[in-house]
Structures are given as C-alpha cells and as structure tokens.
Image (spheres, grey):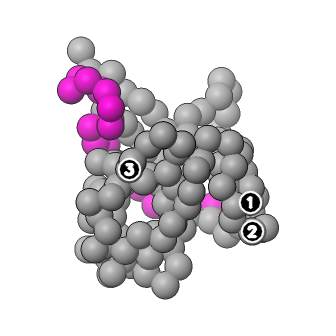
C-alpha cells in the first residue's frame, strides 16, 4: 500500500534560480514548505510554514497555484511518495533560515543533483517553462 506525504511548497524564483532550503543534518535541498496542520487550507499552511522556515510572510492576496507534483519521498521506503501542492506568492521581510533550516540557496538547473526527488521534478518543469536556467 502506497503512503502519501501531503505537503504544500513555495516556488520562489529570482534571476531564473529557485529558492531552496536544506534542513539541519540533511544533504539535499528542497523547496520550502511543509505539512498541513489539522483544518488548515493550502494557503494557511504555505504562510505558516514559510514564516517558520524562512522568517518571511507570504502576502495572502498574491498566492497563486503552480501545480501538484508527486515523487519518491527521500529517506523513506519505496512505497512512500510525497505529493507537493506548489504555490507562488510575494513576501514581506528578509529571508533568513529558521527552525530546522540550516541554510538557503538559489539553485539553477545545473544544480539539480543537489535537490530532493520532488524538487528535481519541479525543477524540470520550471526549466521546460523557461523559468529556470
């Protein structure tokens, strides 16, 4: 039986590079975001998770759906996949790693091998759309 890890993620691109985060003790980068708390909408989850991880606040009126992606979950069994509902949105504040995040970076398509499986899938889509170099 396949287990699904349901997450919400923030796609933020600057100079055709994708903002990614790396958790403490991990080697791969991923798109910032996380799991819903009981009763939360995607938008509420996005705003809360990004603020917890990056110390910035997503402007609710600017949130827009980018797509839903599924890939093998890193560090889990073969029967576990991650489903990422991805959104774009403008933010207020200065991006600073917080909570479990050790560092942030801007990844270009040439850096894809440093990303999690789900992030790689999204980077492929961004590259195909001409949004990531």
Visible residue check, residue 61 = no
Compute the Cα span from label 1 to label 3: 22 Å
Percent position of residue 8, x then y: 52, 44
Name the side, left or right, on which 31 lies relative to 100: left
Labels 1 and 2: the sequence-earlier one: 1
Number of numbered discs: 3
Visible residue check, residue 96 = yes
Q: What SS does tag 2 mark? A: loop
Percent position of residue 84, x then y: 43, 44
Q: Nearer the viewer, mark 2 or mark 3?
A: 3
* x 67%, y 33%: residue: 40
Name the residue carrying label 1: 56
Compute the Cα span from label 1 to label 2: 6 Å
* Image mark for residue 68: none
Residue extending farthest to the right is 93
* x 65%, y 24%: residue: 38
* Residues tagged 1 and 2 counted as in contact (Cβ below 8 A): yes
Name the side, left or right, on which 67 lies relative to 8: left
Tell me which segment is drawn in magenta: 63-80
Labels 1 and 3: the sequence-earlier one: 3
* Residues tagged 1 and 3 counted as in contact (Cβ below 8 A): no
Name the side, left or right, on which 54 lies relative to 76: right
Is residue 79 on the magenta stretch? yes
Name the residue carrying label 2: 94
Q: Is residue 37 above or below residue 85?
A: above
* Image mark for residue 28: 3
Q: Is residue 120 above or below residue 130?
A: above
Is residue 28 on the magenta stretch? no
Residue extending farthest to the bottom is 15
* x 45%, y 33%: residue: 6
Q: What SS does tag 3 mark? A: loop
């Amino acid at each position: 039986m396949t287990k699904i890890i349901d997450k919400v993620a923030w796609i933020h691109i600057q100079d055709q590079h994708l903002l990614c985060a790396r958790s403490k003790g991990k080697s791969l980068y991923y798109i910032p975001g996380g799991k819903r708390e009981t009763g939360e909408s995607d938008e509420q989850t996005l705003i809360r998770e990004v603020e917890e991880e990056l110390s910035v606040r997503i402007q609710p009126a600017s949130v827009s759906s980018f797509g839903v992606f599924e890939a093998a979950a890193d560090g889990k069994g073969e029967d576990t996949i991650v489903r990422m509902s991805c959104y774009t949105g403008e933010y207020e504040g200065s991006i600073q790693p917080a909570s479990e995040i050790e560092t942030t970076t801007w990844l270009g398509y040439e850096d894809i091998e440093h990303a999690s499986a789900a992030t790689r899938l999204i980077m492929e889509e961004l590259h195909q759309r001409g949004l990531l170099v």
